[in-house]
Amino acid sequence: MISSSLFHRYPSSFVSNQPQCPPHHTLHTRKILNNHSPPASTPTPTHHRREKDENIRDEARLNSKSHNFSAKYVPFNGDPSEKESYSLDEIIYRSSSGGLLDVEHDMSMLKQFSGEYWKALFDSRVGKTTWPYGSGVWSKKEWVLPEIDDDDIVSAFEGNSNLFWAERFGKKFLGMNDLWVKHCGISHTGSFKDLGMTVLVSQVNRLRKMNRPVVGVGCASTGDTSAALSAYCAAAGIPAIVFLPADKISMAQLVQPIANGAFVLSLDTDFDGCMKLIREVTAELPIYLANSLNSLRLEGQKTAAIEILQQFDWEVPDWVIVPGGNLGNIYAFYKGFKMCRELGLVDSIPRLVCAQAANANPLYLHYKSGWDEFKPVKANATFASAIQIGDPVSIDRAVYALKNCNGIVVEASEEELMDAMAQADSTGMFICPHTGVALTALNKLRAKGVIKPTDRTVVVSTAHGLKFTQAKIDYHSNDIKDMACQFANPPVTVRAEFGAVMDLLMKHLNKGS
Ligand SMILES: Cc1ncc(COP(=O)(O)O)c(C=O)c1O
Ligand SMILES: N[C@@H](CCOP(=O)(O)O)C(=O)O
């Protein structure tokens, strides 16, 4: 039996999947929340414990309400007068003309509530354990996948990642006082992919419950997509199949899908080759495609942009810098910011910078050519191995996003990205090489004066540094061909004797003074 006291544990607007209070109440609600005192209707806290057969899903089921929010697939950047659209319950990745798809929300329904209303609602859900809103993604459920039943959601309470004030790095290396790193990689599987994968796997869970023929979910990967897919599928008991380019991903990334029980294929090709194969295979077999070609993924990823605004108390930063590979994420950020502007939460959007490794730089070349004809490249090896991609599936999305926010594309050489990573680490971070690519872009734009010392700037950190320890070991061992490794900090071997240790320490301490 579900205890009736559960109904009284939260104000109803915190637990319902429909906004409850009318817009004119929201300013009041917000003020209350900001003052950290409970809304008047909150009962005195009790030390409630659930009965054996109760859980947070049951609570969500009891509290769910009907609503009129909806979303559908439409051709990406299509002609609005064309009527082509598909239910999100269809298994489809391309429009009738072969172009990309986008998830389009019924904005007229969302606009029935004011910007102030949405801010108060989203703010009220942060940091709770209420299913599914405790997740940073599902706390924005009405804007993500409004029609999914809470019961079908597969979530690890992802999102709500740290927006880190890079105080020392900003001051020491860039003369900046308002520099932030959005640590999307401090996450369930160690990358931002969790944000999109919770949405995609939840939808697959729904489709399978509807008896749709989905025998498994598959992706091509440079390591992070496969890790996220495998974890969320394992949590839901859904078979995962991953195509990996042999010897091109880190050990830590490789072991993730193996440990989570996915069927792992190591293929003698690069990521672009794996991507081509998974597209062919998913066209033949009832395996659902989990790469960002599937626009559902981007609905989850866009919440990182909304979260950044929320973390700045809905003030808009000047710049957001995102490392780009298959190029879904740069569009996801744009879409998140744009929705906040359209729905009245903010009145402008930041300028976006997409940062690429020079060894895998098709977007950069396209940008430099003045957006002339796009040409895929053969991506060369890079320490930023997760963005070693030469033929990005979301090229059109990225170009659209950058053109619409006065965006910039910057490239980083191997030495630049590794030095930037080492410098960031020396100020207490432990970032991945892809974040080093983004920091290089920042260095270059600061040096040119494009980004000003006081500009509020966010660098998106996309994966956890612990996935890329070998790159750091190579750098700090001074063991990289043609690289000075100028910030290497190798361990010093010394005899285990007091005198030898003291001599060494004295030398070291004198050097510092
Ligand atoms: C760690 C990391 N950073 C950046 C990216 C680039 O994201 P996107 O492919 O959406 O451009 C990826 C994946 O491609 C990644 O795994
Ligand atoms: N870096 C990605 C590459 C695939 O990108 P996706 O967003 O299209 O899945 C990875 O980790 O596999």
Image: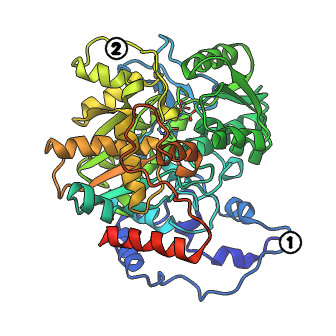
> Element at badge 1?
loop
Disc 2 or 1, which lies upstream in sequence?
1
User: Which amino acid lies under the numbered mark 1 shown in the image of this protein?
Assistant: Lys
- Residue that numbered label 1 is attached to: 52
Q: Quadrant of residue 57?
A: bottom right
Position of 491 with respect to 263 (left or right) is left
> Element at badge 2?
loop
Report the residue at 30% width, 39% height from top.
353
For the residues marked 2 and 1, what is the alpha-carbon distance in whole angstroms? 59 Å
Q: Residue furthest left?
A: 449
Q: Nearer the viewer, residue 313 or 281?
A: 281
The reply to whether residue 167 is visible in this rendering is: yes
Position of 409 with respect to 216 (left or right) is left
The number of callouts visible is 2
Q: Nearer the viewer, residue 214 or 84?
A: 214
Q: Position of residue 177 (x, y in %)?
A: 23, 63
The crowding category of the residue bearing disc 2, from other C-alpha atoms within 10 Å (few below 14, some 14 to 19, many at least 20), is some
Q: Quadrant of residue 325?
A: top left
Report the residue at 25% width, 62% height from top.
171
Which part of the image, by quadrant, shows the N terminus?
bottom right
The crowding category of the residue bearing disc 1, from other C-alpha atoms within 10 Å (few below 14, some 14 to 19, many at least 20), is few
- Residue that numbered label 2 is attached to: 374
Q: Quadrant of residue 25?
A: bottom left
Q: Nearer the viewer, residue 37 or 328?
A: 328
User: Which amino acid lies under the numbered mark 2 shown in the image of this protein?
Assistant: Phe
